[in-house]
């Protein structure tokens, strides 16, 4: 199938009319980004934040118009209210108007200090998802994704219905880690939804299912968050007790947008024992505190190496730093995961250690941490067998 071109997409969007004044969204410079990857097209439409909640029909109309273009198999359209005042638009106007390359305008995150209000947009509604847990880190390379996968499987082993969302738009790794490199979402029985691939009894969604594994995602922050929101909103998750979200590293747009748009129940921070990793972990933890997301605790990954032959323990990256940091920051220390080649090989081969070695020491370590997380969820939203007793946005005072 021939891939669509930019001119075809613009022509399709030119037929989408803003009901307020009867003008095309292209003529009004509302199209802020167009990304074409083979037969997949992602569109970002900039809107007045006051109108955002009322423009879902316009978004769907634009999505249908793009989907109807010859060569398009997947169309995703997201609304953003994050264009800076006076910033030029990134998509061409109607014929005769000025233009800029797609994605040229930059979004600006709101000031941290209170839970953001989402630019006038309503929080995403996920009524069948009992709780949402973000697994985050201040920096990359600490094993956050591996931890997310094995914690999700450990929670599922407790009898919970679990979903796993890959929120690392720029570096999706869950398809490989779960043996789903060739998997694709399928149309759902629910109109407008897609059924995500499943593995080991959990449903998984990732932008990695939509793009080639070696294809870079070169998007501005608002466009990346728009794609993430669509993965959340348009996926048929079914009824879930827990959604585990593998966050990207750092404290940028996606982390802040998740806090403002998604009813996060709690955050889990992953770090290695080194001082530099712990410094970044503190930043990540404090970011969640500043946006009033409860922090369930800190995990020390790659905590030590145990020789499989003699049992000698070597603290390759130091030891106990995360436990000490948790005490200083007044958050629970959830546990430590050893450094082991089997964990890395399992992730590379799509065979998580919790599944491949269910009775092993590492599985027991992940299971103990999952027990603490499940207890923290129950404290926030009530036990699974009881109706939700508390808001997913609890007012929490931090020292």
Image (spheres, rainbow, N blue to C red):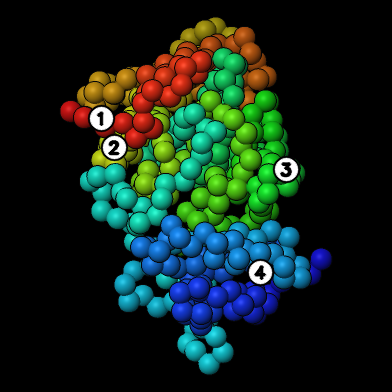
Between 267 and 274, the residue placed more toward the observer is 267
The quarter of the displayed image where residue 138 is located? top left
Q: Residues within 10 Å of mark 1 (few under 14, many from 20)?
A: few
Residue drawn at (47%, 87%) of the image: 98
x and y, in percent, of residue 241 in the image: 53, 25
Between 235 and 107, the residue placed more toward the observer is 235
x and y, in percent, of residue 329 in the image: 24, 27
The quarter of the displayed image where residue 281 is located? top left
- Whether label 2 touches label 1, CB < 8 Å: yes
- Whether label 2 touches label 3, CB < 8 Å: no
Between 272 and 241, the residue placed more toward the observer is 241
Query: What residue did someone put label 1 on?
Result: 396
Callout in the foreground (1, 4)? 4
- Could you say whether the residue bearing mark 1 is in a helix, strand or loop? loop
Mark found first going from the N terminus, 2 or 4:
4
Query: What residue did someone put label 2 on?
Result: 292
């Amino acid at each position: 199938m021939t891939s669509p071109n930019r001119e075809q997409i613009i022509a399709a969007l030119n037929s989408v009319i803003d009901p307020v004044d009867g003008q095309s969204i292209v003529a009004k410079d509302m199209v802020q980004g167009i990304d074409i990857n083979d037969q997949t097209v992602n569109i970002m439409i900039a809107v007045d934040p006051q109108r955002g909640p009322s423009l879902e029909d316009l978004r769907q109309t634009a999505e249908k118009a793009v989907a109807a273009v010859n060569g398009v198999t997947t169309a995703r359209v997201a609304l953003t209210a994050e264009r800076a005042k006076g910033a030029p638009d990134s998509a061409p106007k109607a014929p005769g108007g000025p233009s800029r390359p797609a994605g040229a305008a930059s979004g600006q995150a709101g000031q941290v200090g209170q839970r953001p209000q989402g630019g006038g947009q309503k929080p995403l509604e996920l009524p069948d998802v009992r709780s949402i847990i973000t697994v985050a880190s201040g920096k990359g390379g600490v094993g956050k994704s591996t931890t997310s996968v094995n914690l999700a499987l450990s929670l599922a082993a407790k009898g919970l219905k679990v979903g796993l969302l890959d929120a690392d738009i720029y570096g999706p790794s869950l398809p490989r880690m779960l043996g789903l490199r060739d998997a694709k979402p399928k149309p759902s029985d629910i109109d407008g939804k897609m059924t995500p691939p499943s593995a080991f009894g959990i449903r998984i969604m990732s932008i990695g299912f939509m793009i080639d594994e070696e294809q870079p995602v070169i998007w501005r922050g608002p466009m990346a968050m728009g794609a993430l929101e669509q993965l959340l909103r348009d996926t048929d998750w079914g009824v879930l007790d827990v959604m585990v979200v593998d966050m990207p590293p750092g404290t940028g747009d996606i982390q802040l947008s998740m806090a403002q748009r998604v009813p996060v129940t709690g955050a889990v921070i992953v770090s290695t024992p080194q001082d530099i990793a712990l410094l970044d972990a503190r930043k990540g933890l404090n970011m969640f505190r500043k946006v009033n997301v409860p922090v369930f605790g800190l995990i020390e990954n790659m905590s030590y190496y145990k020789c499989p032959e003699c049992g000698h323990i070597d603290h390759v990256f130091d030891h106990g730093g995360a436990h000490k940091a948790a005490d200083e920051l007044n958050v629970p220390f959830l546990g430590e995961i050893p450094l082991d080649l089997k964990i890395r090989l399992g992730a590379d081969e799509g065979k998580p250690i919790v599944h491949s070695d269910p009775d092993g020491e590492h599985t027991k370590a992940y299971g103990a941490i999952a027990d603490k997380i499940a207890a923290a969820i129950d404290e926030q939203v009530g036990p699974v067998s009881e109706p939700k007793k508390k808001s997913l946005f609890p007012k929490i005072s931090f020292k």
